[in-house]
Image (spheres, grey):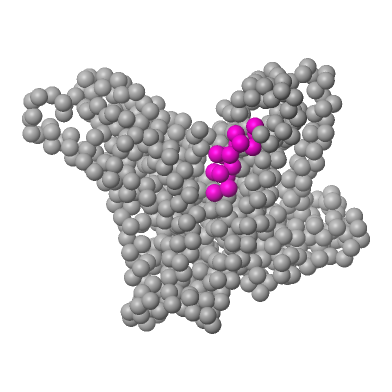
Amino acid sequence: MTDLAPTSSARTAPPRRRMPRDLPRFIVLCLLSVLFLAPVYWMISTSLKTEADTIATPVQWIPHNITLDNYREVLTSPDGNILRWTWNSLFVAAAFTVLHVALCALTAYPLARMRFPGRNAWFWFILSSLMIPGIVTLIPTYIMMLNFNWINSYHALIWPGLSGVFGVFLLRQFFMGIPRELEEAARLDGANSLQILTRIILPLSIPSLVTLAVFAFMGSWNNFLWPLYTVTDVDKMTLPVGITTFSQRYVTEYGKLMASTTLAAVPALIAYLVAQRFLEAGLSTTGLKE
Amino acid sequence: MTVTQAPPQTTTAPAPLPRRRTNLEPYLYLLPHAVLFFVFTVYPIGYGVYISLHRWDLLSGRQPFVGGEFFRNIFTPGTPQFDFFWKTLWNTGFFTLVSVPLLVAAALGLALLLHRPIFGRAFFRAVFFMPGILTVSVMGILWRWLFDNQIGLVNAAREALTGAPPIPWLSTEGLAWVPIVVGTVWWTVGFNMTLYLAALGNVPQSLYEAASLDGATPWQQFRHITVPMLAPVTLFVVVTTALASFQLFGQSLIITNGGPNRSTQSVIQYITEEAFTNTQYSSAAAMGFVFGLFMLVLTAAQFRMMARDVKGD
């Protein structure tokens, strides 16, 4: 789907004529890339400068005295611990992802493959919650967290989001496409519904399960507003919220600030480099079927 | 679609025990999610109505009934709730009006640049997509530093090129939107670009071939083939981008903290300030409902498009 090269190159003229025509396009792309990469370059180069050099005039495009002091200080800061926040984010996102995918699969299975009274009514009832903007439930859910005594606990970061239904919708659509003959054959062999789910439906649905898992993980990892207010204890903070406390602390110490944002970006960058191809394909195909 | 029944149910022997088991089964699968759905989606909506009709005071522990007072405040000129709610709602709408056309046009432009094969295509795609993987706080802290009033990169580059004195971007009303909007475009345009690239790949090449034979110029081909063929994805991109823009929160919170003089404060930031800084939970809950109505109008469009995709009965 994303591989456009064969079809398009087939109709264009031979390479010798194409090259000069493509040159302007190539130059424009290079200039745009410089613009897009400049902020990231500036973040990393600032993080490697001494504090005096970060505000030197004229501006230092290339750091003169490269130092790792900012990183050392940020990693050992008594005001917060980036490694601890990274761990919190990882734990919360992993726990959320596993539970979310399991719940969505359990729910989507009967909605897609069984016939029972109230099936469509329930499907449309939960699906209609996609229309409810999150801001409507923000305050009541926060008060519930107070009542449950879940403020400053991982529970607040994991459980409320599990009531989401987009994944149910996604998996139901996929499950419905699986040939019924496979299921009937298994049933004749004496398989019960749970065995059909775990041995036939789920193995055949791995692409959609992985897509949902990636979405769930990214959503939890990048969540900002909710953890900002439900977790105020520095040790329990997630990475996105934790580094904002650094931005309040190092308000004029740009080297340390940029070292902390660089460190906060590293896990996502690594994940992106590993999963790049899959991620972009997943984003471009999910939610938009022609 | 037609759903064939499982063999045990269609057999003529209506043994009561297995039948009952098969009938209960689907509900058992639905149960775990249903419990969470009732606790964290259905109940909070009702609870929110209750909270907004009472005065929620965490300190005194009493919650007297006040009726529609907090909703009336939102619509009564002169109250701080009226002034700030509508001001920040306007700010959010302004941000949406400015950022959506930019995010759609820039995404389409990048996709067109990258659609046909070119040397380094995968690299360019990755470069434009990559900022989107950063969390909002990394993006926000970075863009605040880039537009720093004194020694940010933007002011430094401007001074190096033109010798002009630094501009106090972050503390000038109006100008403070620049880092927020530019940062948001940088941050999210790659996502829309990816959607456009996928859609461009689905446009049949034969249409262009036929048009070239008929002597259509590249502009005419773009105008009469590409744009109409991309209409569905454009609708999708516009609606989802508008929805996301209306949810503006982290960018303006971190880059400008809503300033100067609340000129870049988003309505969500104001609602959270009312709740968590002013501890006016009931007032914030009421605003959540009013703002939720605005969002609902936008979401309805997206929901309708998704419902079109739902196959079956």
Is residue A185 in view? Answer: yes
Give above or below for B299 relative to A167.
Answer: below
Residue B119 placement, left or right of A5 = right
Position of the C terminus of chain B by quadrant: top left
Q: Within the image, what quadrant is residue B69 found in?
A: bottom left
Q: Position of residue B158 (x, y in %)?
A: 85, 58
Q: Nearer the viewer, residue B98 or A265?
A: B98
- Answer whether residue B235 is magenta in the image: yes
Is residue A162 in view? Answer: no
Q: Nearer the viewer, residue A121 or A26?
A: A121
Q: Residue furthest right?
A: B163
Residues in magenta, as a range = B225-239
Q: Nearer the viewer, residue B310 or A111?
A: B310
Q: Within the image, what quadrant is residue A79 found in?
A: bottom right
Residue A104 placement, left or right of B205 = left
Q: Position of residue A12 (x, y in %)?
A: 74, 20
**Looking at the image, which residue is at 44% across and 47% down?**
B303
**Looking at the image, which residue is at 80% across and 57% down?**
B154
